[in-house]
Image: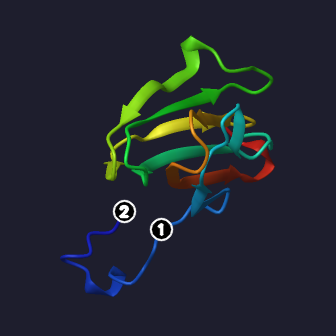
Amino acid sequence: MPDTATNPQYSSIQFTNPQRETVRKVFYQGNPGTSDTLLYTSPNLPGARSEILQLIVTNTDSSARTLWLHMVPKGGSNAVSNALFYEVSFAAHTTTIHDSLRLVMEEGYMLRGSQVASNKLCLTITGLVEIRRGGLS
């Protein structure tokens, strides 16, 4: 890679890999249901993956509320072994930000969640989606 400090002519060059495309996106924003709810599915394409970077949980209620959140492998279902948050209580009128997650979801993985009371917890989940053209690994 050229040294941009000693070679200013290279300072505007962006190095990209034409075989991969990465896009930043919001995976989910809303209120999970009171029963198991599909929140996001990583693209079901050969070589695709998603990376969860940030999770924001806001409790809009005057009481503490509980969240379940699972990262489920393709074709799988919720289990203790794939729980990210399992019966985690969030205090009344608070916002919790988890911004150093870097959780990788392979193709077809799902985020599934639920809460005890309707419309009390609001989730915003953001990250990156990477698609490898031609299914390259």
At label 2, the amino acid type is Met
Q: In this picture, is 7 found above or below 64?
A: below
Residue drawn at the location 80% of the way across and 44% of the way down: 45
Query: Which of the two discs, 1 and 2, labels the residue nearer the N terminus?
Result: 2
At mark 2, the secondary structure is loop
Q: Are marks 1 and 2 in contact (CB under 8 Å)?
A: yes
Percent coordinates x, y for residue 32 in the rendering: 63, 44
Q: Which mark is residue 90?
A: none
Rendered-image quadrant of the N terminus: bottom left
Q: Quadrant of residue 11?
A: bottom left
Q: What is the distance, in whole Å, between disc 1 and disc 2 at their CAs?
A: 9 Å
Rendered-image quadrant of the C terminus: top right
Residue drawn at the location 48% of the way across and 37% of the way down: 103
Residue drawn at the location 57% of the way across and 39% of the way down: 117
Residue at the spot of label 2: 1
In this view of the protein, can residue 98 be seen by the observer? no
Label 2 crowd bin: few (<14), some (14–19), many (20+), radius 10 Å: few
Q: Which mark is residue 15?
A: 1
Percent coordinates x, y for residue 17 in the rendering: 58, 60
In this view, the residue in front, 131 or 26, is: 26
At mark 1, the secondary structure is loop
In this view, the residue in front, 31 or 92, is: 92
Percent coordinates x, y for residue 6 in the rendering: 19, 77
Residue drawn at the location 39% of the way across and 40% of the way down: 101
